[in-house]
Amino acid sequence: MQLSHNEENNFSLTRFESMLKTNDVLFFDSEEFEDIIHHYLENGKIALAKKAVKLGLAQHPTSTNLKLFKVEILVFEDKLDLADGLLNELHNLESSNEEIFIQKANIFSKRDDHKMAIQMLELALDITLDTADVYSLLGMEYLFLEDFENAKLSFMQCLEADEEDYSALYNIMYCFDFLEQKNESIDFLNMFLNKNPYCEVAWHQVGKQYFDLKQLDKALMAFDFAIISDDYFIGAYLEKGKVLEKLGRYNEAIENYKITLDLDDPTSFAYLRIGKCFEKLGLDEYALENYSKTVHEDPLLDKGWIAITDFYFKKKNYQKALYYINKAINIDEENVLYWKRFAKINSRLSFFEEAERGYQKTIDLGNYELETWIRRCDILINLGEYETAIQNLMQAVEFYPDSAEIEYRLAGLYFNLNEGDKGYFHLNNGLKIDSEYYIIIEELFPKIFSRKSVKEIINSYIKTS
């Protein structure tokens, strides 16, 4: 009975590993060693691959392929000079072996000399029968150089040589996206689909391009074709669900998201989108049920916790919103979105000290939006912390030097601290930037606004503006 290739490989592996355990020396032909080494490299078992190379070369010292495996391991271990020396020896013996040039390219790439790597790959391209792999490597080198046009062309040639190389297709789309060539990418995909009408990956990609261009009907059609091509394609159902959501067809969107739950392990993304759809339909109980499943599936997904928090916030159930945002903060204290919600909720509950702490934490974490500085300032004014409010606004001025909202607040604060010169200075600044915003003084500092001198300055600007 003749063994299949896979059975032969398994038999060779079993014999080889048995030899290592018993220290017996068994003979393998060079092709068996190549299969054994390839298996170990594919599975990341470098130590075993090195043993196989050493024993293989002991039995077959002239084997070029075994020496090339040795080069591959040396490159992996960053022993680039040793690898380069061995390649030079091999090149003198066998100058028409494309693998020598591919490994030389790998060494140049590791040394960040991507232009020389490209030269080596072009030499390999002249002699190889497997152009797809070489074009793919060329594409990656061009990506390292951020030459997206040439990278795109290389991946296109790779795909032309092997129409089932979907990694090349994804890389082509990456280049199109980086170059912001939406329409060109659609033209390319449609041309590819004319030759490969049942390529689910291409339909999926063209659908995403149409979605980005807000051509939702075309996107929907493309995702339908992706599903027809492969009715187990989870990504197509998810994208179709997103389109249906945008079209307001929430029940159909839910159906598509639910299909993904049946096809594979549930995802937090699907539960979240289902919850959003139910919320849009006014089915609050089902919305909450799915939001709960979202955070159960992925407790670190901030969008899940935010969805529950926002759900209760919209219902003006601020106590429950506070409970869930606190749970979120316990999981991730460095999340700016959590602290922004925390501050906003506490503000609605009139827990001003906690709200101020929330905004301060948001700023500490690098959120420098004008709204954050302003809200913190207004809370500090409410708490009578005028000097801290001024310090807060002085930090804000560094980021927003021409903000009327900041200037009017500084004016009111300085007047409250009886520093009239600074108060008038910032009042004039605010009026120069935007005279209509003087209402800030009226709302936040009514006693200051009622002063005759302040009103006269404001009126003089209003008349001339």
Image (cartoon, rainbow, N blue to C red):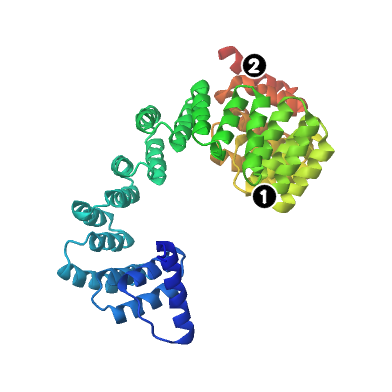
Closer to the camera: disc 1 or disc 2?
Answer: 1
Residue most extreme to the top:
463
Residue at the spot 25% in from the left edge and 70% down from the top edge: 64
Q: Which residue is mark 2?
A: 459
Question: Sequence-wise, which precedes: disc 1 or disc 2?
Answer: 1
Front residue (pair 48, 448): 48
Q: Is residue 184 left or right of residue 389?
A: left
Front residue (pair 182, 236): 236
> Which amino acid lies under the numbered mark 2 shown in the image of this protein?
Asn
Q: Residues within 10 Å of mark 2 (few under 14, many from 20)?
A: few
Q: Secondary structure at mark 1?
A: loop
Q: Is residue 81 left or right of residue 45?
A: left
User: Would residue 237 be visible to someone looking at this image?
Assistant: yes
Instruction: Pinpoint residue 267: horizontal percent, then vertical percent.
Output: 64, 44
Q: Is residue 234 left or right of residue 175?
A: right
Residue most extreme to the bottom:
23
Front residue (pair 209, 333): 209
Q: Residues within 10 Å of mark 1 (few under 14, many from 20)?
A: some
Q: Quadrant of residue 96?
A: bottom left
Q: Compared with residue 95, is residue 14 higher up or lower down, i.e. above or below?
A: below
Q: Which residue is mark 1?
A: 300
Instruction: Pinpoint residue 360: horizontal percent, then vertical percent.
Output: 69, 46
Q: Is residue 213 left or right of residue 354?
A: left
